[in-house]
Amino acid sequence: MAAKVFESIGKFDLALAVAGGVVNSALYNVDAGHRAVIFDRFRGVQDVVVGEGTHFFIPWVQKPIIFDCCSRPRNVPVITGSKDLQNVNITLRILFRPVASQLPGIYTSIGEDYIERVLPSITTEILKSVVALFDAGELITYLPAGHSVLLQLPQ
């Protein structure tokens, strides 16, 4: 009698463990400050951006791609010419983050490594165009070391 009870409990525990493993493989977490985009093998990248928390997905059909949406710093050193054609060695420190609603388009058109593909070229070109407006003397006068300038990138 006791052997049958323990055998049925063992079968129940095995079934419960298998069910728990299946459910666990269909869950993913999106941490604070992050967002996720879902890639579906049949429908492609979905337009919905998933917020923070624990979410379900269909294993082997869907794949969550997690993006960091917190503001992060980056230093971009550039050697460029001033208005009076003197070489200026300047470093621009930028704070950047992606717009969460644009993540499906960013992933589709640029990829997960959008930071390395976009930021260096945009920041270098904007910095060169701003530095070219000033003489070397004006840059020394108006931009002492550690001074911050706010540049709004076009969207």
Image (tube, helix red, strand yellow):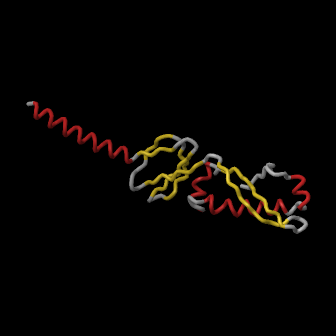
Q: Quadrant of residue 110?
A: bottom right
Please tell me which residue is depicted at 88% across the width and 52% down the height of the picture.
Answer: 142
Q: Residue furthest top?
A: 2
> Which quadrant would the C terminus be assigned to in this image?
bottom right
Tell me: residue 146, above or below residue 11: below
Q: Quadrant of residue 118?
A: bottom right
Q: As drawn, is 82 to the left or to the right of 36?
A: right
Q: As drawn, is 10 to the left or to the right of 114?
A: left
The residue lying toward the viewer, choosing from 139 and 58, is 139
Q: Where is residue 69? Give x, y as percent.
A: 60, 47
Q: Residue furthest bottom?
A: 85
Q: Where is residue 4? Give x, y as percent.
A: 11, 34
> Which quadrant would the N terminus be assigned to in this image?
top left
Q: Where is residue 97? Give x, y as percent.
A: 65, 50
Please tell me which residue is depicted at 54% across the width and 43% down the height of the picture.
Answer: 51
Q: As drawn, is 11 to the left or to the right of 25?
A: left
Tell me: residue 116, above or below residue 34: below
The residue lying toward the viewer, choosing from 97 and 94, is 94
Q: Where is residue 14? Give x, y as percent.
A: 23, 42
Tell me: residue 5, above or below residue 112: above
The residue lying toward the viewer, choosing from 115 and 47, is 115
Q: As drawn, is 10 to the left or to the right of 91?
A: left
Please tell me which residue is depicted at 43% across the width and 45% down the height of the picture.
Answer: 56
